[in-house]
Image (cartoon, rainbow, N blue to C red):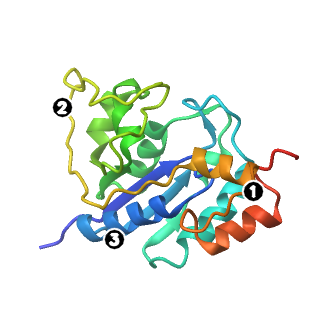
Amino acid sequence: MTFPLRVGLLGGSFDPPHLGHEALACAALSELALDRLLIVPTGEAWYKTQELSAAPDRLAMCHLAFDGLDTRIQVDARETKRTGASYTVDTLRELQLELPDAQLYLIMGDDQWRSLARWHHIDEVSRLAIICPAYRDPQVLAWGDTSPADSHDLSGIRPPLRVQALTMAPMPQSATAIRQSVSVSITLDGAVSPAVAQYIQQHHLYRSDT
C-alpha cells in the first residue's frame, strides 16, 4: 500500500522569522509526520497595514532560521515573485498541480486561525488543505483586530473545514514586538536565532534611525 506525500505549508510575512515560527515548524513536522514542509514568505500581504521588509531580506532570514532545523524543510520563494496581493489559495492551487497525489496541510498560528473567516477564497482553501492551527497565545490578535477574541465564526465555510490542531507550548514571540525591540536597541536574546539576530544587526533592519 502506498500513502500520499504529506506536504505542509507554513506561510507568513516572516518579518522577521522568530523562535515561535521555528517551534511551530518542528511541531508540524513531528505531529503531522510530514514528508516536506514549505516555508513560504508572503510577497505583497493583503492583510498587513505596514510595509514589509524587502523580500530578499526576509528570504535570507528564513534560510538562516529554518535551513538547519530539518532536511525536510524548504524555503519557497514563489509568493515573493508574484505581482499584486499574495494569497494562500494561489499557492495551494499551484502545489496541487505540482503534486496532484499529495495531501496538503496548511500550518498556522493564532493570528491566522482567528482571521480565517476573512481569507480570500476560504472555501477553496478548505477544500485544498487540512487546516492545522497551533494555539500559541490566547492574547494574540487576529489580523486587523484591536483586541483579542475567543473565536471567529467559521460555521458558514463550505465545505466545512478539515482541522487537525497542533499541540505546542505557548510561545510569546511576536514579530511586531521584535521590530519594536530593535528600534529601541533591546536585545533579541530568546526571540530569534543568533543567526537571524546577527543578520538584523548587520543589515540595519527595523532601526528607527534608518
Disc ID at residue 160: 2
The residue carrying pointer 1 sits among few (fewer than 14), some (14 to 19) or many (20 or more) residues within 10 Å by Cα, namely few
Q: Position of residue 183 (x, y in %)?
A: 75, 49
Q: Secondary structure at mark 3?
A: loop
Q: Identify the mark nearer the N-term, 1 or 3.
A: 3
Query: Residue under circle 3?
Result: 35
Image quadrant assignment for residue 162: top left
The residue carrying pointer 3 sits among few (fewer than 14), some (14 to 19) or many (20 or more) residues within 10 Å by Cα, namely some
Q: Residue furthest right?
A: 210
Disc ID at residue 171: none
Image quadrant assignment for residue 127: top left
93 shown above or below 197: above
Name the kind of residue labelled 1 in the image: Ser
Residue that appears at 35% across and 61% down = 7
Q: Do the residues bearing badges 2 and 3 touch, measured as CB atoms within 8 Å?
A: no
Q: Do the residues bearing badges 1 and 2 touch, measured as CB atoms within 8 Å?
A: no
Instruction: Give the quarter of the figure containing the N terminus.
Output: bottom left
190 shown above or below 118: below
Q: Secondary structure at mark 2?
A: loop
* 85 or 164: nearer the viewer: 164
Name the kind of residue labelled 2 in the image: Pro
Q: How much space separates mark 2 and mark 3, taking CA atoms?
A: 25 Å
Q: Which marked residue is nearer to the observer: mark 1 or mark 2?
A: 1
Is residue 51 shown left or right of residue 156? right
Is residue 133 shown left or right of residue 197? left
Disc ID at residue 185: 1
Is residue 196 shown left or right of residue 24? right
The residue carrying pointer 2 sits among few (fewer than 14), some (14 to 19) or many (20 or more) residues within 10 Å by Cα, namely few
Q: Position of residue 3 (x, y in %)?
A: 19, 68
Q: How much space separates mark 1 and mark 3, taking CA atoms?
A: 40 Å
